[in-house]
Amino acid sequence: MTTIFITGASSGLGEALAREFSNEGVALGLLSRRLERLDLLANDLLGTVCSFSADVGDPLAMRAVAEEFIRSVGVPDVVIANAGISAGTMTNFVADQEVFERIMRTNVLGIVNTFQPFIDAMEKRGSGTLVGISSIAGFRGIPGSGAYSASKAAATAYLESLRVELSSSGVRVLTVCPGYIKTAMTDVNPFYMPFLMDAGSAARSIKKAIDKQKRFHVMPWQMRIVACFLRLLPRLVYDQLFKRAPRKPRSL
């Protein structure tokens, strides 16, 4: 039986991933802060489903969940650190400091806290895949979204470090950098979102990347071109192009 553990599974991309992987031969571990939403989702899924309520920013809680999951169904074959939050932020607003901290804790340390309790067991077995959901928002600093861009840049760098650290262990690391995915997190954006994907298509794309044992995956394919373009833009040109870009609302 294939075992898969997914964080942020109660809605959006996490829910779509749970549905994409659901079948009679799979044991799913689904984690969210909203257990009631997970229980409703579990009723629609096939195979074994274990639901857990925890904050990915809490390392002790995540270790306890991992231990329970391993006791219940075994060491996971795939761990997907999907949980993430987003909000517009401005450094000059004192109230946004707490938002900065929450975004960094969830989007960066949340990945660390998700992977850490499973790595030793996966290394001992000599196999498994760790999947971290980052974003193309981490390729350059997006004005008005400093916390989110910084968190995704940090996530991408961390995942690369981890991939190399585990390269001889049999445990693979996949960094996923989506563009815009239609979820509650993007529904609040008051601006046009090019190449917007639905969550189901995004989940299928991620599953294919896992099956192909990819190391780095940007989706949709059009965003790979955008990502390359953003990386190559000189700073002066980037500053001029983006200084008047629309901003994400300051709320979380």
Image: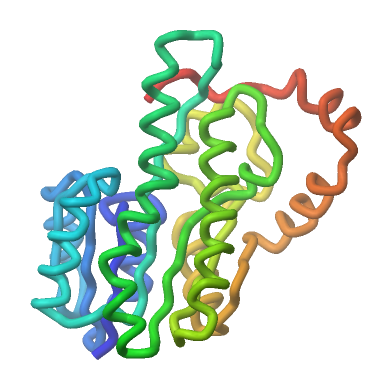
Q: Nearer the viewer, residue 15 or 78?
A: 78
Q: Position of residue 118 (x, y in %)?
A: 28, 71
State the image quarter where residue 14 is shown.
Answer: bottom left
Q: Is residue 148 left or right of residue 122?
A: right
Image quadrant containing the N terminus: bottom left
Q: Nearer the viewer, residue 3 or 111?
A: 111
Image quadrant containing the C terminus: top left
Q: Position of residue 65 (x, y in %)?
A: 15, 61
State the image quarter where residue 76 is shown.
Answer: bottom left
Looking at the image, is 162 positioned above or below residue 89?
below
Q: Position of residue 94 (x, y in %)?
A: 44, 9
Name the residue: 41% across, 55% down. Answer: 13
Looking at the image, is 5 positioned above or below residue 32?
below
Name the residue: 36% across, 76% down. Answer: 78
Looking at the image, is 73 positioned above or below residue 160?
below
Q: Is residue 169 left or right of residue 40?
A: right
Q: Is residue 55 left or right of residue 133?
A: left
Q: Nearer the viewer, residue 39 or 243?
A: 243
Q: What colour scheme does the image use?
A: rainbow
Q: Position of residue 151 (x, y in %)?
A: 51, 40
Name the residue: 73% across, 59% down. Answer: 224
Q: How many marks?
A: 0
Name the residue: 77% across, 20% down. Answer: 243
